């Protein structure tokens, strides 16, 4: 039974994300209807939800009775008509613009007139998805991270047509569900996928240049940076096909921005079917009997690798703030809560010192002659004014030239 006063929630799309969001909403006391036209997908989602609740109960995170109550709040439906009367509907279908548009137009016809409508896209234009709605003012992006029940961050992304009240409702809802919302500008990659690109891209560049192998790069980022996983381990976990597609999408969406240029090496991995864990082999071999390669253990090399990737990440975070994608505070919050970085990148840059970050980027730009390594105007402002990146970012919000 839903808790009193909480709106009925409709979730469209019973994949990993849709099922995860349904579980989040039900755990927060809402009555949930999970819809998918594929009966097999609905059955699979129900099975995953039941298994997840059973694991929580076995670990003592829920009582058996609580797990049963949460599970009882989630119903499944093969028809969109069963979403009638929903006060919140979140779409989590395939990442294809026309599919999402069509689904949301159909949802609009059955949901309550003042229902909050959201898409869980990680890369598509929110304005583009909502363009076919009769009332796009009640529509925005709510990007949950996988796995949705465990990950704290939700990127709330208003389109140009989204009403301010809709943003407030989405932020309030995310907080009520135990999440940490950050508001992002409707630009490719939003906050996290944009800022995180050098974690993968610069690691691939180091591999392509023959500076170090995948095992050594991963070791360096964990040993000297404190990251939970190295770039190549994470690409294998995400799936090289998924990771490559996000990078390629951003590269084209930003009209060939060199910082997001995809790697030919990763493209060949995808073409060869070396997708990572899900295919059994990627940058590492996960098949039975495979031996994990050992890193070089060269401390000086490891520190150089780590430093090179870190300054690119700091620069990307600074640039996202400079272009108004997010605030300094939320840029750091997004990376620690969304992808478990050990520190916020602006804070990290301030610890190193903005001048040291700028020197490293200028050296890379001089060595390679590529705009890939150009420094953000926000970084240059911080160095020129002798302030921190965070202070420079906040000052920029109040106006002033670079």
Image (cartoon, grey):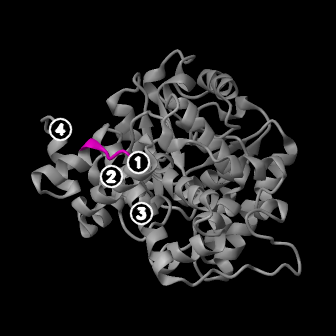
Q: Is mark 1 on a helix, strand or loop?
A: helix
**Location of residue 247 in the rendering, given as x and y in whole percent from the top left corner:** 59, 43
Q: What element carries label 4?
A: loop
* Residue ID at (55%, 37%): 250
- Of tags 4 and 1, the one toward the viewer is 1
**Location of residue 198 in the rendering, given as x and y in whole percent from the top left corner:** 49, 54
* Residue ID at (39%, 36%): 185
Asked whether 55 falls inside the magenta stretch, the response is no
Question: CA–CA distance between discs 2 and 3?
Answer: 14 Å
Q: In this view, does 334 lie above or below 112?
A: below
Contact? badges 2 and 1 (CB < 8 Å): yes
- Give the number of the disc on residue 79: none
Q: Mark 3 points at which residue?
A: 310
Q: Earlier in the sequence, mark 3 or mark 1?
A: 3
Q: Name the residue under label 4.
A: 402
Q: Give the range drawn in magenta.
A: 373-377
- Of tags 4 and 2, the one toward the viewer is 2
């Amino acid at each position: 039974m839903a808790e009193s006063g909480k709106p009925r929630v409709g979730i469209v799309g019973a994949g990993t994300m849709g099922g995860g969001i349904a579980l989040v909403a039900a755990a927060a006391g809402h009555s949930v209807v999970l819809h998918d036209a594929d009966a097999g997908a609905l059955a699979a989602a129900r099975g995953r939800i039941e298994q997840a609740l059973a694991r929580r109960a076995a670990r003592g995170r829920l009582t058996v009775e609580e797990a049963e109550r949460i599970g009882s709040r989630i119903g499944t439906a093969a028809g969109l008509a069963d979403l009638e009367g929903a006060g919140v509907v979140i779409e989590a279908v395939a990442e294809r613009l026309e599919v999402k548009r069509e689904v949301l137009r159909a949802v609009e016809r059955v949901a309550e007139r003042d229902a909050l409508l959201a898409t869980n896209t990680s890369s598509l234009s929110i304005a583009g998805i909502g363009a076919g709605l009769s009332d796009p003012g009640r529509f925005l992006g709510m990007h949950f991270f996988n796995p949705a029940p465990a990950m704290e961050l939700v990127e709330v992304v208003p389109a140009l047509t989204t009403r301010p009240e809709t943003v407030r409702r989405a932020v309030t809802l995310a907080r009520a569900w135990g999440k940490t919302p950050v508001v992002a500008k409707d630009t490719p990659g939003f906050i996290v996928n944009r800022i995180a690109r050098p974690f993968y891209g610069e690691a691939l560049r180091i591999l392509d240049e023959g500076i170090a192998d995948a095992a050594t790069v991963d070791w360096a980022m964990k040993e000297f940076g404190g990251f939970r996983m190295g770039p190549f381990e994470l690409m294998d976990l995400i799936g090289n096909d998924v990771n490559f597609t996000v990078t390629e999408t951003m590269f084209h969406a930003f009209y060939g921005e060199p910082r997001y240029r995809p790697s030919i090496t990763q493209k060949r991995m995808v073409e060869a079917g070396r997708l990572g864990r899900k295919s059994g082999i990627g940058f590492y071999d996960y098949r039975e009997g495979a031996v994990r390669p050992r890193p070089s253990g060269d401390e000086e090399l490891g520190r150089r690798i780590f430093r090179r990737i870190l300054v690119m990440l700091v620069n990307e975070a600074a640039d996202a703030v400079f272009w108004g994608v997010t605030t300094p505070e939320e840029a750091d919050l997004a990376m620690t809560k969304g992808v478990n970085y050990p520190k916020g990148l602006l804070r990290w840059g301030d610890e190193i010192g903005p001048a040291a970050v700028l020197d490293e980027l200028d050296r890379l730009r001089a060595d390679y002659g590529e705009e890939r390594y150009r420094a953000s105007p926000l970084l240059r402002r911080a160095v020129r004014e002798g302030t921190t990146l965070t202070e420079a970012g906040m000052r920029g919000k109040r106006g002033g030239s670079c």
